[in-house]
Amino acid sequence: MFRRDKAEELIKKYFSEEERKLAAKEYSARYYMKNRSEILAKNAEWSQRNKEYLKTKKHSRYLNGAVPTRIKQREQILNAYGRKCSECGVTDVRVLDLAHKNGNGAEHRKAVGAWKVYKDVIDQGFPKDFDLQCKNCNWLDWLRIKPPATTL
Ligand SMILES: [Zn+2]
């Protein structure tokens, strides 16, 4: 007789957590590939049935929380750092990014999480080690810090 608890015990005994996680991942990937059309049809049917719900505010992450908060935070950042590129002075906010003057943006994002960088800068009271740069100047800065192995 197959005993699930016994089987689980044996699996735990012989396979590490990592191996078990990988196996589960593989299983669900295989399951998805095998049943892809049914799964997609089911999802489409659910969306069709819940059309009205999907239109509501309650459902939307976009309308509800994260994005409006981020827009507000970005406004605060833009205002605090002068709404222009510190290098070339361009004022089109569409191309302006918060720049880490000492080039440790990746570290900062890793430390606080990419979506928390604005909040962190606001919480720190807009420190001087940040400014605004347009995408071009930011990229040129990055190339100065880390020159590419080859140039085209
Ligand atoms: Zn610039």
Image: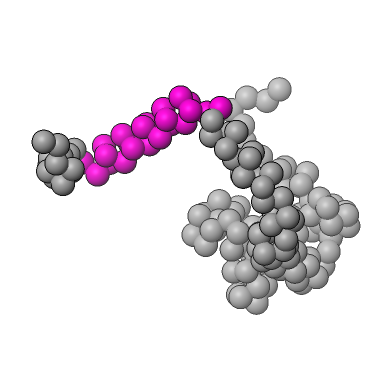
Residue 47 position, x and y percent, is: 66, 45
Residue 17 position, x and y percent, is: 24, 44
Residue 131 position, x and y percent, is: 72, 62
Q: Is residue 8 above or below residue 124?
A: above
Which residue: 14% across, 41% down? 3
41 and 122: which is toward the camera: 41
112 and 13: which is toward the camera: 13
Q: Is residue 124 above or below residue 28?
A: below
Which residue: 54% across, 58% down? 113
Q: How many marks?
A: 0
The answer to whether residue 83 of the structure is visible from this angle is: yes
Residue 61 position, x and y percent, is: 66, 59
In the image, taking residue 120 as reference, residue 25 lies left or right, namely left
Magenta span dominant secondary structure: helix
111 and 89: which is toward the camera: 111
In the image, taking residue 118 as reference, residue 38 lies left or right, namely left
In the image, taking residue 117 as reference, residue 91 lies left or right, namely right
Q: Is residue 107 above or below residue 128?
A: above
Quadrant into which the C terminus falls: top right
In the image, taking residue 62 as reference, residue 20 lies left or right, namely left
Which residue: 67% across, 64% down? 58
Task: Report the magenta residues as a range.
Answer: 16-37
